[in-house]
Structures are given as structure tokens and as C-alpha cells.
Image (cartoon, grey):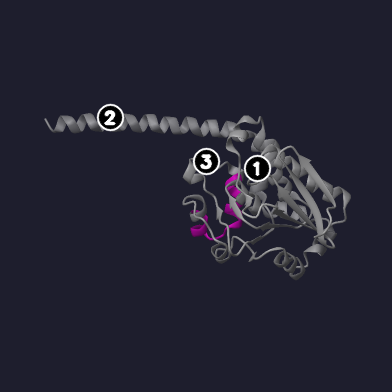
């Protein structure tokens, strides 16, 4: 195994950067037990990406997990709620960094990627998934959490088949490796060897040379970029939607009460 180029250490875990071959940087995160997307995780990844961009020659960034069972099990919801500005300053900052990063990115998803972990993989340019174990799943529908705009838009822009999109968002379907490949969610199945083969086949190490890779990606996913730019307004928009839902509930409840009274009167 290649010697680390550097490590980013946080109280909750570590991100290690190695170079499996020239112009390929492998970021391996290890935040036991399941790589939850906490403030520590997001900030470690943001710094690790900065170090590659501003210290090393251009190349391709590959991210993966040191924990065989999990690429990432998503947010720690309690910590996210308790951390002031968590979404704007941490999770969405990481999403935005990946969306605008000047180098090609590949997610080597070696295990389960649920909820925010699935989203993080989708913010990469390419995805290689474990063919024999693990699932990709946006399971918010199962535990009663709404999706913020930046969480959903990346799926809307990258998943072209509406039936697959519906299965992801509204059904919380668990995609195996085979299903993920068949539905265009991932670009291949395998491990690091398959990632390196993909990089070679698509000549990805040469693409950053012109200096516009990040700008092209940002334009390609303009809708998602715009949402990330205004993510600080998410809370106000959520409050407005909650007010609308309350009015709908109150209005609907009154109509049902009127119907019930009328129904009882008609039976007399």
C-alpha cells in the first residue's frame, strides 16, 4: 500500500491521502463506526481537498472508506440539529466544493451509502460501487425526514429516468450494485483497480490541464449550484412551507368537520 502523502486528523476520525499512481489522489476517510457526516467529517474532507488543490499537481481525486461495511451512513441527525449552521457551513459546503472542484472526482463506494452518504457519492463525477455487498439508498421516506433542495436536486439532475428517480426519493429503494449499474446510478462495479481503469479509459488525469473543469461542471449542474449558493435561505423557506402546510391542514380539517355534521344531519 502506498505511503500517505498527508493526513487530516479530527477528534472523530481521520482522512488519509495516498497516491496509488501518478496524478491520482486517494482520500480514505475513517470515522468509526460508519462515517457519519458530522462537522468533523465535513471539515476534514474540505481541508483534504484544499491540500490537493493548492499543494499538489493536478490529477484525479478518488474518495473511499477505510470501513469495509460503509462508504457513509449519512448524517448524524442529532448532531446536525445541535450544530449551529451545520448545513450551510459543513454539509452543503462540502457538496458545493465537490460540485465546483477543479479536478475530476470519483467515489469508490465500497459499502453502504445511505441518505447523506448517497448524496455525497452523487456529488462526485463518477461512481464505482461494490458489486457484492452494500446498498445505495435515500431512506428519508422511511424515517420521516424531508429533503432540503440541495439534497434532492443533484439526483434530479443526474438521474434521467423518472421511474428510477421516483424509486430513489419516494420509495427509498435499496439499490444493489447490479441494480445501481442497470439504472445508471453508478458507472461501474468493483474496487480500486476498476477505478484506475475508468480513469485511464476516460483519460481523466489530462482533463484539468485547461483549467476549466470545475467551471464546466458548475455550468452543467447550474440548478444545483444555484441552490447551494442560496442554501442559507433554506430555513426561512422551510418555515414558509410549514406555514402553508398548517393552513392546508386547518382548512382541510374544517371541511371534514362540515362534511361530518352534514352527514349526521342527513341520517336523522
- Number of marks drawn: 3
* Residue 202 forms part of the magenta stretch: no
Q: Name the disc covering residue 257, or none.
A: 2
SS label for mark 1: loop
The vertical placement of 147 against 216, above or below, is above
Span colored in magenta: 151-166
Please report contact status of discs 1 and 2: CB closer than 8 Å, yes or no: no
Furthest residue to the bottom? Answer: 201
Q: Quadrant of residue 9?
A: top right
Q: Quadrant of residue 181?
A: bottom right
Kindly identify which residue carries mark 1: 37
SS majority, magenta: helix
Is residue 229 visible in the rendered image? The answer is no
* Residue 156 forms part of the magenta stretch: yes
Q: CA gap, disc 1 to disc 3?
A: 17 Å
Rendered residue at 15%/33% (across/down): 266
SS label for mark 3: loop
Q: Earlier in the sequence, mark 3 or mark 2?
A: 3
Q: Earlier in the sequence, mark 1 or mark 3?
A: 1
Tell me: 37 left or right of 245. Answer: right
The vertical placement of 263 against 6, above or below, is above
Question: Residue 162 location, x and y as percent?
Answer: 51, 58
Tell me: 142 left or right of 255. Answer: right
Question: Residue 104 location, x and y as percent?
Answer: 76, 58
Question: Residue 36 location, x and y as percent?
Answer: 64, 43
Question: Residue 166 location, x and y as percent?
Answer: 49, 54
Is residue 25 visible in the rendered image? The answer is yes
Kindly identify which residue carries mark 3: 146
Amino acid at each position: 500500500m502506498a505511503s500517505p502523502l498527508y493526513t487530516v486528523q479530527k477528534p472523530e476520525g481521520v482522512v488519509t491521502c495516498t497516491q496509488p499512481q501518478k496524478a491520482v489522489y486517494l482520500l480514505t476517510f475513517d470515522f468509526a463506526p460508519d462515517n457519519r457526516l458530522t462537522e468533523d467529517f465535513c471539515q476534514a474532507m474540505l481541508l483534504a481537498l484544499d491540500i490537493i488543490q493548492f499543494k499538489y499537481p493536478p490529477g484525479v481525486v478518488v474518495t473511499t472508506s477505510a470501513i469495509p461495511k460503509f462508504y457513509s451512513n449519512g448524517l448524524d441527525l442529532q448532531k446536525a440539529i445541535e450544530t449551529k449552521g451545520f448545513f450551510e457551513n459543513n454539509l452543503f459546503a462540502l457538496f458545493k466544493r465537490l460540485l465546483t472542484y477543479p479536478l475530476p472526482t470519483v467515489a469508490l463506494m465500497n459499502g453502504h451509502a445511505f441518505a447523506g452518504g448517497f448524496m455525497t457519492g452523487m456529488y462526485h463525477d463518477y461512481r464505482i460501487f461494490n458489486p457484492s455487498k452494500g446498498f445505495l439508498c435515500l431512506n428519508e421516506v422511511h424515517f420521516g425526514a424531508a429533503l432540503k433542495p440541495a439534497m434532492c436536486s443533484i439526483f434530479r439532475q443526474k438521474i434521467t429516468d423518472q421511474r428510477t428517480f421516483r424509486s430513489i426519493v419516494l420509495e427509498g429503494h435499496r439499490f444493489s450494485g447490479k441494480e445501481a449499474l442497470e439504472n445508471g446510478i453508478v458507472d461501474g462495479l468493483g474496487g480500486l483497480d476498476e477505478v484506475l481503469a475508468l480513469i485511464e479509459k476516460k483519460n481523466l488525469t489530462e482533463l484539468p490541464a485547461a483549467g476549466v473543469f470545475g467551471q464546466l461542471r458548475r455550468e452543467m449542474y447550474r440548478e444545483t449550484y444555484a441552490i447551494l449558493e442560496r442554501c442559507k435561505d433554506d430555513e426561512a423557506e422551510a418555515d414558509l412551507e410549514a406555514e402553508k402546510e398548517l393552513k392546508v391542514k386547518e382548512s382541510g380539517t374544517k371541511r371534514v368537520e362540515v362534511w361530518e355534521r352534514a352527514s349526521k344531519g342527513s341520517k336523522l
